[in-house]
């Protein structure tokens, strides 16, 4: 079973997940929200449309599959947690300074 490491609020949470588990749903089930206070209530519900569920992928990042997540990865924005399935060990960092989407970080541009 893949291990998901979640870095948030200077804390690390580790959970074992079923292969193929959805990252957003796994975070929410662990009571760790990828959203801000505002977007917790105003989001697309995991349809890949709003980009408010973004997290940074620190290790084990899978290639982006969804068009919107591909754009996020290509330009260094937080990856869409609702569009990521966990098949291997993965480390994510909750974006703690975002207001809605989270800023661009050129060092996080996806490199296959
Ligand atoms: S919840 Fe809207 S893009 Fe992920």
Image (cartoon, grey):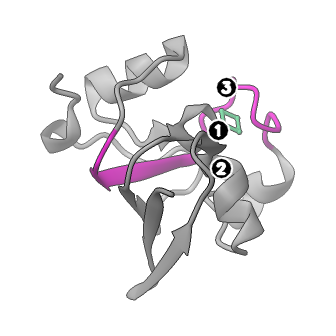
Determine if the C-beta at disc 2 is less than 8 A from ligand 1.
Answer: yes
Mark 3 touches mark 1? (CB < 8 Å): yes
Q: Looking at the image, is mark 3 or mark 1 earlier in the sequence?
A: 3
Is residue 18 inside the magenta stretch?
no
Chief secondary structure of the magenta portion? loop
Q: Nearer the viewer, residue 88 or 97?
A: 88
The residue to which callout 3 is attached is 48
Report the side of 109 relative to 18 (left or right). Answer: left
Residue at the (72%, 52%) spot, across then down: 25
Q: Nearer the viewer, residue 93 or 97?
A: 93
Determine which of the numbered discs, if any, sits on residue 82 in the image.
1
Determine if the C-beta at disc 3 is less than 8 A from ligand 1.
Answer: yes
Determine which of the numbered discs, if any, sits on residue 24 in the image.
2
Mark 1 touches mark 2? (CB < 8 Å): yes
Q: Position of residue 86 (x, y in %)?
A: 51, 44
Residue 95 in view in this figure: no
Q: Position of residue 94 (x, y in %)?
A: 47, 64
């Amino acid at each position: 079973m893949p291990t998901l490491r979640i870095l948030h609020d200077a804390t690390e949470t580790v959970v074992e997940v079923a292969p193929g588990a959805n990252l957003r749903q796994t975070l929410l089930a662990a009571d760790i929200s990828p959203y801000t206070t505002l977007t917790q209530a105003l989001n697309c519900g995991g349809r890949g449309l709003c980009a408010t569920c973004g997290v940074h992928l620190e290790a084990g990042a899978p290639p982006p599959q969804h068009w919107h997540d591909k754009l996020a990865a290509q330009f260094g924005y937080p990856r869409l947690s609702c569009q990521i399935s966990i098949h291997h060990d993965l480390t994510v960092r909750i974006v703690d300074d975002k207001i809605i989407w989270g800023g661009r970080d050129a060092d996080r541009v996806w490199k296959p």
